[in-house]
Image (cartoon, grey):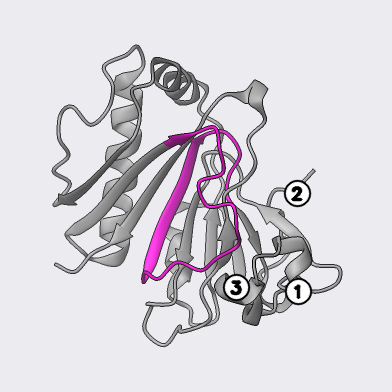
Amino acid sequence: MIPAIALDKPSSYALMVDAAADLAAIYDPDVQLVVWQRPLNAELRSYWQRAAEAGNVGRRIVARDGALPEDLLPDLPGVETAWSELRFVDWLFRDLCEVRTLGVRIECSQDRVCPRFHVDHVALRLLCTWKGPGSEWVDDAQVDRRFLGAGSRGLPDEQSGLLRPGAKIWQIPEQAIALCKGDAWAGNERRGVVHRSPAVAPADGARVLLALDLLED
């Protein structure tokens, strides 16, 4: 079993924080990942379970000033809770980064959408798995970035040389809000978070992920 992130003390790479305001730690040049673990919202999880079973999940839009289309979320029991969550996370990210425009992606899949470890070519991405296992990541000191992408020569992550001996794969908790720096963050080339989608057990049904990206205003 992959351990959920459980850092006893701050590291130079990833931080576990206790409050929304502490997400600002992402501005530390040494920090690549900040995770705010929240109590699991059972009503939110149940809503996305129903939405996934109805096959009515999956959108990608550009939102300015928090303007989200009324039909973005399926009209099912619990939709008010889902809207409150989405509007809060949207506001939180825009306020933290002082931007007006975000790329919004809601993704539902039983399969690994991004099965290989990789780095995002964006400045900053917010990830929140509303239902199912969270994304997996590896500390920078435990990977050899030469074997990312084509450097893997088509071999699995565990065989390509990407993971150094004894490397531990961590997992972001369900419904935690994670801020992940990418290679496009100023001065962060070849330093972004190395991560991938998790495996999803068939018995657990589909995984539902929210991803928000910074866009140029």
**Residue 195, located in which quarter of the rendered image?**
bottom right
Residue 171 visible to the viewer: yes
Residue on which the image places disc 3: 148
The location of residue 139, given as percent across then percent down, is 68, 70
Circles 2 and 1, Cβ within 8 Å, touching? The answer is no
N-term-proximal mark, 3 vs 2: 2
- Residue 121 included in the magenta stretch of the image: yes
The residue drawn where x is 56% and y is 71% is 149
The stretch of residues the image draws in magenta is 108-135
- At label 3, counting other C-alpha atoms closer than 10 Å, the crowd grade (few under 14, some 14-19, many 20 or more) is many
Q: Secondary structure at mark 2?
A: loop
Whichever of callouts 3 and 1 sits on the residue coming sooner in the sequence is 3
Mark before the other along the chain sequence, 2 or 1? 2
Instruction: Name the one closer to the observer, 52 or 70.
Output: 52
Residue 120 is left or right of residue 166, and the answer is left
- Cα–Cα span, label 3 and label 1: 9 Å
The number of discs equals 3
Q: Are marks 3 and 2 in contact (CB under 8 Å)?
A: no
Q: Outermost residue, front direction?
A: 154
Q: Is residue 161 magenta?
A: no
Residue denoted by label 2: 3
158 lies above or below 187: above
Q: Residue furthest bottom?
A: 187
Please indicate whether residue 23 sits to the left or right of residue 116 in the image: left
Amino acid type, mark 3: Leu
Instruction: Say whether residue 8 is visible.
Output: no
* Residue 127 drawn above or below residue 152: above
Name the front one of labels 2 and 1: 1
> What is the three-letter code of the residue carrying label 2?
Pro
